[in-house]
Image: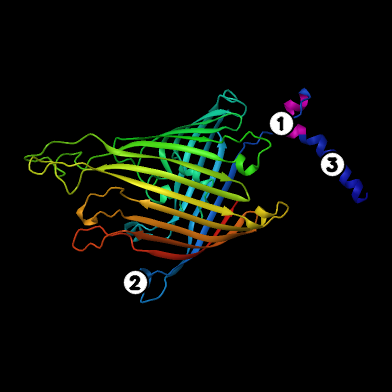
Amino acid sequence: MNLRTLRSALFAVSTAVFPFISSPLAAQSGQTPTVVTPAFDFSGVIFGSWGLRNDSAAHAALGGKSPNQFGLDRAYLTFRMPAGDNTQIRVTTDVFQQTNAAAGAYYGGWVVRIKYGYVQYTGLRDDFGAGSNLTGRIGILHTVVIDHQESFWPRYLSQVALERNGFMASADAGAAGLLTLGNHWGEVYATVVNGPGYTGVERDRFKDFALRLSLTPFGNQKDLSPIWKSLAITPWFSKGWSPSTFAAGGLNEVGPGDNGAITDGLQKDRYGIFAGIKERRITAGAEWAQRKDETDGPANGNTATIPRVVVDSTGRLLDGFLLVRPVELFSSTSKSGLQLIGRYDRFTPNTDPVSVNYNGSTPSYNFWVLGASYDITSRFLMALDWQVQDPNSFPTITGAGTVRPIPRSSSLFLHWQATF
């Protein structure tokens, strides 16, 4: 028997026997057995860097030398699995370096926590136009706008401006609804979350309510350039509250002259508008955002002699970025892995400071990113970039108990990212 005859015989035997082994009842009824495989999906992104500090503050702390280090910045591993008809679960792990001093005494390396962990149900398909649906989520999920912005700005280089400047965390525990509009018009996303963010537990009874509308007005224009078809205009807001310093009474305990517990919440509102375009040749975004916060301590009191004083402040953020592939932008037939990167943030912590120490000045922070990336493969890239944070208009304040600005920092990075 030659090799070809042997292969033919084995194929005939396996074809005849396998259905009886896998499903005798199906074979007897004349039906072909169907093997159902759950739609398990596993993906991830891992990125890190080598960084060199070259500012004067870093030199002063190291005898005039420049500190440098290798780091694994993040490793996001995402698992998706159906949980019945129209239902799906998602779990994304967040691998990061332990920087907490107390926990670092036990283990100062890299640890794993949950970034996202939720179940979602999708219904009302095509009820709001072709391609529309409504999805409900509950668990640890995306907050109102940061994930949307990260689809434009590459997270491996830096956090988006809202997260970097403390407006909100990127994830939190709560519930959400996502309405995908039909005919490529965009989406509406609403959330109610605890407020502290996914890195901490709930600390009070208050919740944050938020809403985002992302419109893509040219998404259904077939004859328009893909660059302009991708235009997204995104107004958003978040309404929340913070607990009073005196939620349990006066000077942290009930005593003579105490005015009682303050159970009302303090204002914690954020709102803004973001606009961006996203295409392989060019990606850009611009944003204006504000935050309004109230505080009432601990320098103040809650007694008859030291009354409680509520102080409010408004912070403002302006930022923009541009990522462009110059070779592809000017030659539609060329493909290049080179991408130029630029970003600028201007954050004003308080637009109207009242302290006499400021002498009419309005301090702010400028943040710059300048660099270039190159695609080593379709899923692996490296970037060389320079990042600077520079405080402006801060007065020279001396004396105990004063708050000084974060000193100017300047770093050169070699970043890398791999997706799978």
Instruction: Name which residue lies at 76% across and 29% down.
Output: 32
Examine the image and state in which quarter residue 203 appears: top left
Which of the numbered marks, if any, corresponds to residue 11? 3
* Picture layout, residue 201 above or below residue 385: above
Q: CA distance from mark 1 to mark 2?
A: 67 Å
Residue 323 spot, x, y in % from top left: 56, 53
Instruction: Name which residue lies at 33% across and 36% down.
Output: 240
- Mark 2 element type: helix
List the residue tagged with mark 2: 61
Instruction: Name which residue lies at 55% across and 60% down.
Output: 416
The colour scheme used to paint the residues is rainbow
Q: Give the mark nearer the N terminus: 1 vs 2.
A: 1
| Badge 3 amino acid | Phe
Which of the numbered marks, if any, corresponds to residue 34? 1
* Picture layout, residue 116 above or below residue 88: below
Q: CA distance from mark 2 to mark 3?
A: 73 Å
Q: Give the mark nearer the N terminus: 2 vs 3.
A: 3
Q: Give the mark nearer the N terminus: 3 vs 1.
A: 3
Residue 372 spot, x, y in % from top left: 56, 61
**In the image, 88: left or right of 393?**
right
Q: Which residues are magenta?
A: 19-28
Instruction: Name which residue lies at 62% across and 44% down.
Output: 227
